[in-house]
Amino acid sequence: MSKIRRKIITIDEDKCDGCGLCVPACAEGALQIIDGKAMLVSEVYCDGLGACLGECPQGAISIEEREATEFDEEAARRHVEQQAARERVAGQATRCPSLAFEAAGPSAGCPGTVVRTGAMLSNWPIQLGLVPPAAPFLQDADLLLAADCTAYAYGGFHELTRGRVLLVACPKLDDVEAHVQKLTAMLRESTANRITVVRMEVPCCSALVRVVEEAIKRSGREIPVDVMVVGVQGEIVKA
């Protein structure tokens, strides 16, 4: 294939620690963790726009301009579809039945299996920082943005996920501005309908609401927001 001079990502292997945060940020599937390092699997899959740059905590990814094979959008789409199909097959072949979030008793080869009931996750990943802004499951979705602690404090948390796309974050320990930028990109690139924020009653957790308000403002969209507050004793303080 012929090459042209264009912008494309480059990875500093000395800085890369193989955390993998960049991989889900690339909607074209151009990145993979190989032998403990992030690698560009093919030049044709990299559009050079750098959606992965802000996801690297080590600053190991940058954009350079050089001779490279031209980006092929159709090839990237096929690559992502084939990769997803392989992952589904691998998961069906190797995982224990309980990992499918189904109500099931202990099975052979899976000692200690716990019976699981309740709502199933409709999406993966769920960490706000790991979800690509163009993820297909964000289209026409009602979003549930929950503070990390709420799932542990509120016993009925899984019921809140029914019919919603779950995103989780910590407004105290995480990079709030990074979350604002990520959510803004999601709202711009998706057709999300509504956002429900679930936060703890502690003051620092109110920042999660501000993340949503600022992201909506920057996106230029008008999206209804509901706020639910969970008390430290596990009760619903505000619904």
Image (cartoon, grey):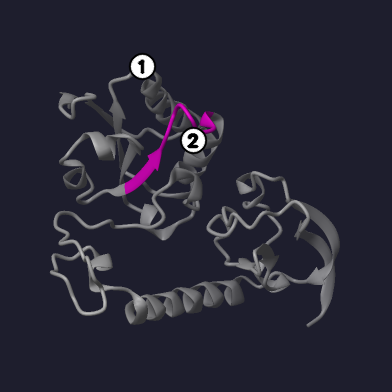
Q: Which residue is mark 2?
A: 219
State which quarter of the image contains the N terminus: bottom right
Residue 238 visible somewhere in the drawing: no
Q: What SS does tag 1 mark?
A: helix
Residue at point 31%, 33% (across, down)? 197
Residue at point 67%, 63% (across, down)? 37
**Residue 201 position within the rendered picture, expressed as x and y whole percent measured from the top left:** 28, 21
**Mark found first going from the N terminus, 1 or 2:** 1
Left or right: 135 with respect to 40? left
Q: Which mark is residue 203?
A: 1
**Residue 63 position within the rendered picture, expressed as x and y whole percent measured from the top left:** 77, 53
Q: How many marks?
A: 2
Region rendered in magenta:
166-176
- In this picture, is 208 found above or below 155? above
- Is 171 part of what is drawn in magenta? yes
Q: CA distance from mark 1 to mark 2?
A: 26 Å
| Residue type at tag 2 | Ser
Left or right: 103 with respect to 12? left
**Residue 60 position within the rendered picture, expressed as x and y whole percent measured from the top left:** 73, 51
